[in-house]
Amino acid sequence: MKKIIIDLAPFKASAARNRAPNSIGVGSVRVAAESGSDSADIYIYGDIGGWWDGIQPEDVAREIAALDVETLNVHVNSPGGLVFDGIAIYNSFAAHSAKVIMNVEGIAASIASVIVMAGDEVRIGESANIMIHKPWSFVIGDADDMRQEGAILDNLEQAIVDIYAARTELDDEKLKNWMAAETWFRGQQAVDNGFADSVVPNKGKEKKAARSALLKLYNHTPSDLKPTHDAPQVRQFEHLLRDAEQMPNALAKRLAAAAQRVFQTPRDEADADPREEGGNAAIAELASVFDRATSLFKS
């Protein structure tokens, strides 16, 4: 595969920035290499770039430049981040003399998917995801500033398309359509469409995708990757019914369990229509328990 080096110089004077906050979230780059070994492991886990805790391109460049090995095994689990920082990291790996094996272990979304394209070989977990989309930005100014920013983003998009095209050998129009639609490729889909070379089968349990506020910003994030901390847990619901509503313990457990079956979507399954078979049964059970609770409080 031909590795493309992207020149960042035309963009450095621009106002283009990722839409996410400059301080995106925690990220870390770690190198594991044994003395005398012909390979090294690099772990890129978390958000890319930013002012504080995101993975910085200078850290990656410094760490891998010091490695005199034949193979770099790069482990990636990142929801993306700042475009320029990600392209700089991509260039660092693309320019390295070692064979670069990229391993998508949870998620490689947005600019993290571009970093992965620097691999001479790309492996993806069966339940892992690669996501591509158009670059984001924000700008404050007049109409001329807006038009200039639009031109900068078009330029950035083409630079990213060039990287995808070099690996997938797909035409620009197809790639741009996928980016415009925000397209997710899980496991084998990534291989089928040229973004990865092989699938690493699941071993009983799916790896967790990176936790980040960025996953809420994307339009088509799969339901099993969306943050779930806003949904009340079944035990919290039990405590509310038992302690706040003074409901008997057994009845509170039954009501909480029935409610969870109605409102909570299992992992790796499409969002269920409550009108479908199975949904009806759970709703009927929930209604029955509510009726019992109502009659109990009336008596």
Image: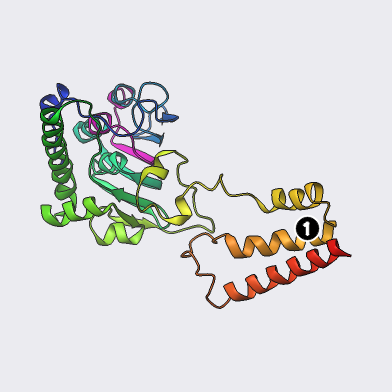
Which residue is painted at 38% across and 41% down in the image?
79
Q: Secondary structure at mark 1?
A: helix
Instruction: Between residue 137 and residue 51, name the one nearer to us.
Output: 137
Instruction: Name the image quarter holding residue 46.
Output: top left
Which residue is painted at 75% across and 63% down in the image?
254
- Residues rendered magenta in the picture: 62-88
Question: Is 8 situated above or below 175?
Answer: above
In the picture of the structure, the residue carrying the numbered disc 1 is 252
Furthest toward the front, the residue is: 298
Question: Is 275 situated above or below 247?
Answer: below
Instruction: Name the image quarter holding residue 282.
Output: bottom right
Q: Position of residue 286 (x, y in %)?
A: 69, 68
Q: Position of residue 129 (x, y in %)?
A: 37, 52
- Residue type highlighted by circle 1: Ala
Q: Position of residue 189 (x, y in %)?
A: 31, 61
Asked if residue 74 lies in the magenta stretch, the reply is yes
Which residue is painted at 58% across and 72% down in the image?
279
Instruction: Between residue 42 and residue 275, name the one nearer to us.
Output: 275
Question: Is 47 situated above or below 184?
Answer: above
Q: Position of residue 261 (x, y in %)?
A: 63, 64
Q: Residue 25: in sight, yes or no? A: yes
In the drawing, does residue 204 fall left or right of residue 121?
right
Question: Is 283 situated above or below 217?
Answer: below
